[in-house]
Image (cartoon, rainbow, N blue to C red):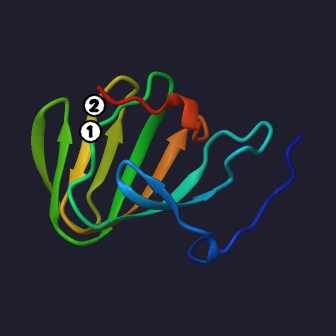
């Protein structure tokens, strides 16, 4: 069984991602149900999808749009978004978000066309 964990999310190293840069917590933990990412989107991100992973986004800062399977939706702080597996998505605009991948993020499950 995985023991409880505490991390300081804003102190984790940034990793480049299709959305910009992510600070990823709880990836690679055995038996973890999800991971948690703090993502800074500084420009329009690259459309991508996940075959096995659903994602929950919470917009913390900024205003812009989320593109979901080709449709644009406006977003602002406290907008929550559910992205099911297979949905092509990208964020547009300077945003800071919390991303919760379920199951935990796996870089082998990140696809672009």
In the displayed structure, 64 sits above or below 90; it is below
Q: List x then y, in percent, for residue 44.
A: 20, 55
Lower sequence index among marks 1 and 2: 1
When asked about the image quadrant of residue 39, the answer is bottom left
Q: List x then y, in percent, for residue 21.
A: 43, 62
Tag shown at residue 11: none
The answer to whether the residue labelled 1 contacts the one labelled 2, judged by CB atoms less than 8 Å apart, is: yes
When asked about the image quadrant of residue 74, the answer is bottom left
In the displayed structure, 102 sits above or below 27; it is above
Position of 12 compared to 87: left or right?
right
At 18% from the left and 63% from the top, the residue drawn is 93
The quadrant the C terminus occupies is top left
Q: List x then y, in percent, for residue 91.
A: 24, 51
Determine the CA span between mark 1 and mark 2.
6 Å
Please tell me whether mark 1 or mark 2 is closer to you in this view: 1
Q: Quickly name the residue at label 2.
A: 88
Position of 91 compared to 25: left or right?
left
At 77% from the left and 45% from the top, the residue drawn is 29
Helix, strand or loop at disc 2? loop
The quadrant the N terminus occupies is top right
Q: Quickly name the residue at label 1.
A: 47
Front-most of 109 and 71?
109
């Amino acid at each position: 069984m995985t023991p409880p964990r505490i991390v300081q999310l804003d102190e984790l190293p940034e990793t480049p991602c299709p959305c910009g840069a992510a600070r990823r917590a709880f990836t690679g933990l055995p038996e973890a149900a999800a991971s948690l990412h703090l993502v800074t989107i500084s420009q329009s991100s690259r459309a991508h999808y996940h075959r096995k992973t659903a994602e929950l986004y919470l917009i913390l800062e900024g205003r812009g749009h989320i593109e979901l399977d080709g449709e644009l939706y406006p977003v602002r702080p406290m907008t929550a978004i559910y992205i099911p597996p297979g949905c092509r998505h990208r964020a547009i605009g300077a945003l800071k978000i919390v991303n919760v991948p379920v199951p935990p993020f796996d870089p082998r499950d990140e696809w672009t066309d």
